Amino acid sequence: GAGVSQTPSNKVTEKGKYVELRCDPISGHTALYWYRQSLGQGPEFLIYFQGTGAADDSGLPNDRFFAVRPEGSVSTLKIQRTERGDSAVYLCASSLTRREGDEQFFGPGTRLTVL
Amino acid sequence: AQSVAQPEDQVNVAEGNPLTVKCTYSVSGNPYLFWYVQYPNRGLQFLLKYITGDNLVKGSYGFEAEFNKSQTSFHLKKPSALVSDSALYFCAVRYSGAGSYQLTFGKGTKLSVIP
C-alpha cells in the first residue's frame, strides 16, 4: 500500500506568515508523529497523536506551533508568525500502534524555507 | 532522558569490504533501538530494530546490528559493502515505559562506499 505522504514537498514563505503542512499517514496506523530535521542533524520530536488527541506535545518549540488530527487520520502542522529559524525539513511518521517496538514509517518531508 | 551518540560524522569504506557504523545510547529502562537510512531528498527508511531476545538482529538489504547492553551500543554492520549503500544512517532509541512515544535520533553518519 501507499506510504506516508506529505504536502507540499517544498514551501517557501516570508517571515511573519502563516503556514500549514499536511501529513497523510499509512491507512490503519493509529499513531502519528511530527519531527523536525535541521541541516546536519537528526530528526527532533515535535508532537505525537494517538487517534485524534495529541498525547505528547512536549517537543513543540513554542506556542507558534500547533498541530491537529481531527478525524484520526490526516494531520496538519500549523506554524504562525514564521521565523527564519523555523526553516527545516518537517517529517511526519506513523506507526500501527503506539507500542514502543513498532517501527515508525516516515514520509518524504516538507522542506520549509522562511525568507 | 534519552540520548544517542554516533561518534563518526563520516565513514568511508571500499566496495566489498565490511562496514560498521557506530551507535551508543543512554536511556532509563529497557531500550528499543532502531536504524534508519536516508537517501538524498528522500525520507527515512527503516532498516532494522532491536526489541528483545537475540542480540544480533538482521534487517533489510543485508544489514545487521549487534546489541551490547554492557557497552550500551548498537553498531550497524554489513559483511560486504555496495556502492548503493552510500547514504546517511541514523540510529534511534526509544525507552520502555509510560510516556515513551518519541524516537530520539543521533546526528547521523554519512557512509561513502568507494568503488
Image (cartoon, coloured by chain):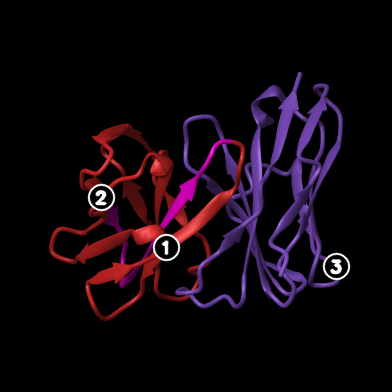
Magenta span includes B80 = no
Q: Is residue B107 among what the camera can see? A: no
Q: Name the spot of residue A29 as percent of width and height, x first.
A: 68, 74
Residue indicated by mark 1: B60
Disc ID at residue B80: 2
Residue A3, quarter of the rendered image: bottom right
Q: Label 2 crowding class (10 Å Cα cut-off): few <14, some 14-19, many 20+?
A: some
Magenta span includes B33 = yes
Taking depth in this image into account, of A60 and A35 the one nearest to the observer is A35
In the orientation shown, which residue stands out farthest toward the bottom?
B53
Q: Residue at x 68, y 75 (%)?
A: A30
Residue indicated by mark 3: A70
Q: Label 1 crowding class (10 Å Cα cut-off): few <14, some 14-19, many 20+?
A: few
Discs 2/1, front: 2
Q: Residue at x 21, y 43 (%)?
A: B17
What amino acid is labelled 2 in the image?
Ser
Q: Label 3 crowding class (10 Å Cα cut-off): few <14, some 14-19, many 20+?
A: few
Q: CA distance from mark 1 to mark 3?
A: 35 Å
Up-down relation of residue A5 to residue B83 (above or below): below
Discs 1/3, front: 1
Quarter in which the C terminus of chain A is drawn? top right
The answer to whether marks 1 and 3 mark residues whose Cβ atoms lie closer than 8 Å is no
Q: Residue at x 85, y 67 (%)?
A: A70
Identify the magenta region: B22-40
